Image (cartoon, rainbow, N blue to C red):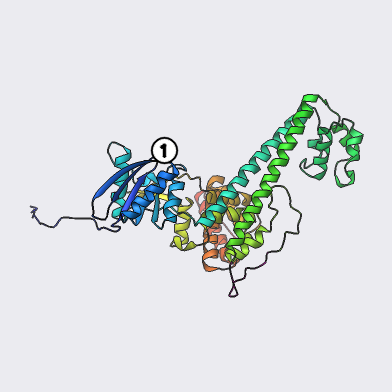
Amino acid sequence: MSKKTKTKNTLQLAVIHEHTAAVDVGSMLMTVAYTDNEGNQQLMETDGFTESLNELVQTLKAAGVTHVAMEATGVYWMALYELMEDAGLKMTLVNPKHFKNVDAQKTDVKDSQWLQQLHVHGLLRASHIAPELYRELRSYVHERNVLQKQKSDTLNRIHKVLTKMNIKVQHVISDIEGVSGMKLLRGIAGGITDAEKLLAGINIGLLKADKEDLLKSLKGVYKTQYVVILKNSLVMLDFFKGQMKNYELLIEEVLQKMLPVDKEKKTPKIPRKTKQVRKNQYSINLKEYLTQIIGVDLTQVDGLDEISVLEIIAVTGINMDKWKTAEHFSSWLNLSPRAKITGGKVIGYSKRFTNNNATQALRMAAQTMWRNKGTLGILYRRLAAQKGSSKAIKAIARKLAVIIYNMIKNKSEYDPQKIQIDTDTEKKKRLKRLEKEATRYGYILQKAA
């Protein structure tokens, strides 16, 4: 028979952050719950104008608030987050999914009060927010990617116009965006309809196609409306290329600020890019900048190029101390499986979705492994054959994340031998499987003489 005893001591959660505030963020309404200097609970609402946000920051500072939590709502949180961060407040950005699993009527007031209560007791998990310089870099990289997509859409429209004109030069020339291709397009947009005159403006010897095929491909239906559309599309194409170049210069300015400083307070000089810049590549010496900033050359890793490395560090930064281990890092990237455990047994794995640009860059790098001849390529093809390409991509992306984490944190060069597959062990496993399979069907596996 069980006995119940009454005690005066009550179970209480420890107070981790005494002077806290929490903000429920909206597009035009901010609901704030905070504790003032006298320990009284305060609640206030303010609009989303910059002047009001500055007044809110000053109010919290005057009340002695030191720690502020806010939920990540779209992009509405960014302005207030940066104002509070600049004012010296310790910020915690929280994923709403992590604290809203409470059975109660949802209101802005209750959200802010509940968020503050959790923050007082240190029960909130902060989202990763990179330092200001990396956030600036990420913004420029994102805008350049948007322009690159718009440039690709414009090229597709140019292809469509050429098809309507029954001009087949885009099928004869391997790259219509190259020097010869652009000269032909500008000639057509300039009103030239004679195939011989169009070819006179390019060096045919540099093309694989012969002159006869080129002449046939340039004979089409040169209607006025199609020529005008082509001309305007070329103007748009030039605009997007120019804007991409402008963002590359801005990215270079940010990268220069990130360069390490030696004892004499000098930064290393980065030479200009000497190789020819191909389409969609950066015109700046991106590889050298990244190597100097990170301390190691991540492009030595199979599947990673300078653009993918830039997109990854623009999100993660280079301070890997934020993640205790490589496993924590890969879990944050949603690249590690999350087991569903009940009754002490694993009953499955939950699917997690993310829009993390670093994750997408790693998955894109993993996707190129199907033709890679290195260890990662062998592992990808084996996993793809066994479990399908989607699982193989995720597994290789996770392995790339672990390699990047260790290289940046330990400042160690890439060593392919560390991920080398033990061929002897693999051979023994394969033989064991074959022997088991042969025994199942009544056969004996023997070594050839």
Q: Nearer the viewer, residue 275 or 54?
A: 54
Identify the image quadrant of the C terminus: bottom right
Which span is picked out in magenta?
260-270
Q: Quadrant of residue 106?
A: top left
Residue that appears at 89% across and 45% down: 203
Q: Nearer the viewer, residue 392 or 91?
A: 91
In this view, the residue farthest toward the bottom is: 263
Q: Position of residue 322 (x, y in %)?
A: 45, 60
Res 344 visible: no
- In this rendering, the answer to whether 437 lies above or below 177 is below
Q: Amino acid at mark 1?
A: Met
Percent position of residue 139, x then y: 56, 49
Residue 415 rendering spot, x and y as whole percentages: 60, 66
Q: Is residue 261 magenta?
A: yes
Report the residue at 78% width, 44% height from top.
Answer: 178
Q: Secondary structure at mark 1?
A: loop
In magenta segment, residue 110 = no
Residue holding disc 1: 28
Residue 190 horizontal side relative to residue 11, left or right: right
Name the residue at 58% across, 47% down.
142
